[in-house]
Image (tube, helix red, strand yellow):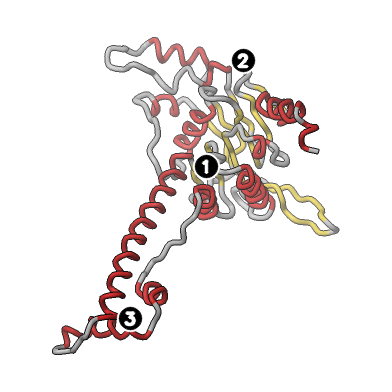
């Protein structure tokens, strides 16, 4: 199929396609090229030349992608910048604005990438801001429903106790509501008249709903710290969800994270951006994961 890299592997005696790569390489401008550009700029109007001189700080020139590629690093390591640059260069969809400085276009124009065919049109970048805005929207909807519910409680009591006579066709809707109140319990009356009722979710459940809604089969997805708002249990659920979409639904993921659960994703290629020179590592070698390991190892006997 055009636009994909296929690797066939035998599983339980059957051949099935399990590898899917749409974006194979991405190249950032080198330090010298960045300096040549920035030295030619006048700083009278701008305080920063972001995203110049961020990724080159760790000599990050090229990313080679697998089905799952993870950018690991602390705040300021450049992992979010890398995702935004890639998304901008590829023209991926997104829901919220981001820190797109005056020099962002100049920087992405210096970048280059290799793709196998065309990047699927529904591919997108998903950021923690996208998820947070979605949760706020749900909360706003539910608050509106709560207000409507209180109004219906009052309408029920009024309709239940009123003596109503129909005098014209204009009273017909009011008559239906009175009859409904007399035939039903309060809870059933409210359910019947409360439309678009959105079930309340915890922040973690709402965040997971967003990923489930936005991630489709046969797509490239850039995820920026998807663990935000997710409990450890939900992070592991997201891990299984993403692994299934790689294995069964032919998706490719590039993920910026420092979650030990997501870092453990099977077959992931991990770039450590905390190193002076960005390097590929196993997830068990990463500083964040080692810190967790050493902490729990210290208190191992207390878990018996």
Helix, strand, or loop for circle 3?
helix
Q: Is residue 204 left or right of residue 285?
A: left
The Cα atoms of the two marked residues, 2 and 3, are separated by 71 Å
Q: Which residue is drawn at 33% across and 58% down?
A: 144
Helix, strand, or loop for circle 2?
loop
Looking at the image, is mark 1 or mark 3 earlier in the sequence? 3
Quarter of the image for residue 300 reads: top right
Residue assigned mark 2: 276
Of residues 119 and 171, the one drawn nearer to the viewer in this rendering: 171
Q: Residue 104: x, y in percent? A: 40, 27
The Cα atoms of the two marked residues, 1 and 3, are separated by 41 Å
Quarter of the image for residue 130 reads: top left
Quarter of the image for residue 196 reads: bottom left
Q: Residue 57: x, y in percent? A: 54, 16
Query: Crowding at label 3, few (<14), some or many (≥20) Cα neighbours within 10 Å?
Result: many
Q: In this view, does 278 lie above or below 232?
A: above
Q: Which of marks 2 and 1 is in front?
A: 1
Looking at the image, is mark 2 or mark 3 earlier in the sequence? 3
Residue assigned mark 3: 181
Helix, strand, or loop for circle 1?
loop
Residue furthest right in the image: 13
Residue assigned mark 1: 229
Badge 1 vs badge 3, beta-carbon distance below 8 Å: no
Q: Which residue is drawn at 55% across and 27% down?
A: 27
Q: Is residue 132 left or right of residue 15?
A: left
């Amino acid at each position: 199929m055009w636009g994909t890299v296929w690797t066939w592997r035998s599983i339980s005696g059957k051949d099935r396609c399990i590898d899917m790569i749409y974006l194979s390489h991405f190249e950032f401008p080198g330090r010298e090229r960045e300096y040549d550009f920035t030295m030619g700029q006048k700083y009278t109007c701008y305080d920063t030349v972001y995203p110049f001189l961020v990724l080159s700080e760790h000599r990050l020139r090229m990313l080679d992608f697998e089905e799952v590629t993870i950018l690991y690093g602390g705040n300021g390591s450049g992992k979010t910048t890398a995702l935004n640059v890639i998304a901008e260069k590829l023209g991926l969809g997104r829901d919220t604005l981001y820190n797109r400085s005056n020099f962002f276009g100049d920087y992405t124009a210096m970048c280059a990438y290799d793709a196998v065919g065309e990047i699927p049109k529904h591919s997108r970048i998903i950021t923690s801001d996208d998820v947070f805005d979605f949760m706020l929207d749900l909360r706003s909807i539910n608050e509106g429903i709560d207000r409507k519910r209180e109004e219906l409680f009052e309408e029920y009591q009024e309709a239940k106790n009123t003596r109503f006579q129909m005098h014209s066709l204009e009273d017909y809707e009011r008559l239906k509501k009175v009859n409904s109140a007399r035939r039903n319990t309060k809870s059933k009356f409210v359910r019947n008249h409360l439309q678009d009722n959105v079930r309340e979710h915890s922040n973690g459940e709402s965040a997971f709903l967003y990923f489930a809604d936005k991630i489709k089969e046969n797509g490239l997805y850039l995820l920026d710290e998807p663990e935000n708002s997710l409990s450890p249990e939900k992070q592991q659920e997201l891990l299984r969800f993403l692994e299934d979409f790689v294995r069964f639904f032919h998706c490719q993921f590039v993920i910026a994270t420092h979650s030990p659960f997501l870092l453990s994703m099977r077959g992931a290629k991990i770039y450590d951006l905390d190193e002076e020179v960005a390097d590929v590592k196993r997830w068990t070698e990463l500083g964040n994961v080692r810190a967790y390991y050493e902490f729990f190892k210290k208190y191992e006997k207390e878990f018996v």
